[in-house]
Image (spheres, rainbow, N blue to C red):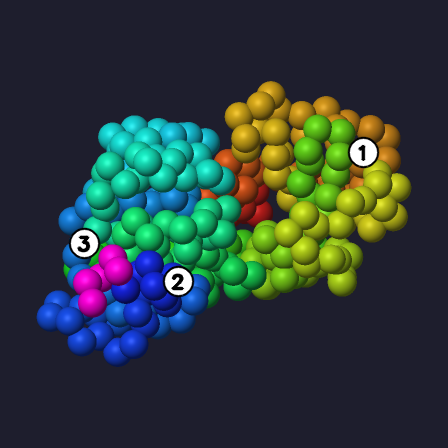
Amino acid sequence: MNRIACAALFGLSLCAAPASMAGDILIQTAQGGVATAQSPSKVVALDVASIDTLTALGVTLAGAPDKLYVDYLGDLGTQPVGTLFEPDMEALANLDPDLIIVGGRSATKAQPLAKIAPTIDMTIGADTIADARKNIETYGKLFDKEDKATALLTTLDTHLSEVKVAAAGKGNALILMTNGPKVSAYGRGSRFGWLHTALDLPEAFENLNPEVHGDAVSFEFIAETNPDWLIVVDRSVAIGEASSAQTTLDNPLVAGTMAAQKGQIIYLSAAPLYIAGGGYTSLSTTLAELKTAFTK
């Protein structure tokens, strides 16, 4: 059975039996262990976190979504193959890739894509740092760039350690995402929860809903929680619209919090965190901004 037929028949499993074909290796994906060929030459990635990490590793991609929203991924020279949510099946078939990588927003398209080429799901889950590390290691093995992967992991660990030291003893934090006039809060176990768990940063309010959209909250909630730090993600900016977070949070209730009184509101670069969350450069960008804020 050839590989494409195998992928079409078994979907996400990609024939995940022990590697038996010459040159195949076993890699770890969001769906478990998968046997696939090492160093595929024509690769399409439909997940921005994966594109982020692959680019950091020096992997050249053949195809990617037409808009990635993240400035540092603006000039990859790849063939457009649809959007983050909707792959262009015809363009993909014409490109005839050796491997398609999905994750996050594109993960639901894995099975139909597997009819075109072997497809692996590299979704970053709730344990962002562990999954990011796993993906760096996996891509290093898959593309024969293990030395580079080791170097990235060492640097990432250094960044994490530096921010933990900088944040230690500085108080608690509340993570907010604004979407125009709407505000949601995120805690441990959420898409931004790694900021608490990986950095040992105490939550200003515990037991927030870990669902992907967070907990819708009011300005009264923010005032009552009275965090030492506010960490803010502006979704409007992340998706290419005009900034609105500072306008949304410009009111007496927020202004009365400890965070505002002490000048401890951190507006993170939104697109890396919201669009490419879990990618190597995304994580490095966020950690650098947090280190700067906590060491002022």
Q: Which residue is mark 1?
A: 255
What percent of the width, then of the height, locates residue 266? 62, 39
- Which quadrant would the C terminus be assigned to in this image? top right
Pointer 3 residue: 40
Chief secondary structure of the magenta portion: helix
Question: In which image quadrant can residue 230 be found?
Answer: top right
What is the magenta range? Answer: 1-5
Give whichever of discs 3 and 1 has the lower sequence position: 3
| Above/below status of 154 relative to 280 | below
From the viewer's perspective, tell me whether residue 253 is left or right of residue 140.
right
What's the distance in space between the residues labelled 3 and 1, CA to CA? 53 Å
Q: Residue at x 46, y 44 (%)?
A: 276
> Please, what secondary structure does the residue beneath circle 1 have?
helix
- In front: mark 1 or mark 2? 2
Q: Residue at x 62, y 24 (%)?
A: 243
Magenta residue check for 2:
yes
Mark nearer the N terminus (1 vs 2):
2
Instruction: Check disc 2 and report its element: helix, strand or loop.
Output: helix
**Residue on which the image places disc 2:** 12
Label 3 neighbourhood size at 10 Å, few (<14), some (14-19), many (20+)? few
Q: Residue at x 68, y 58 (%)?
A: 210
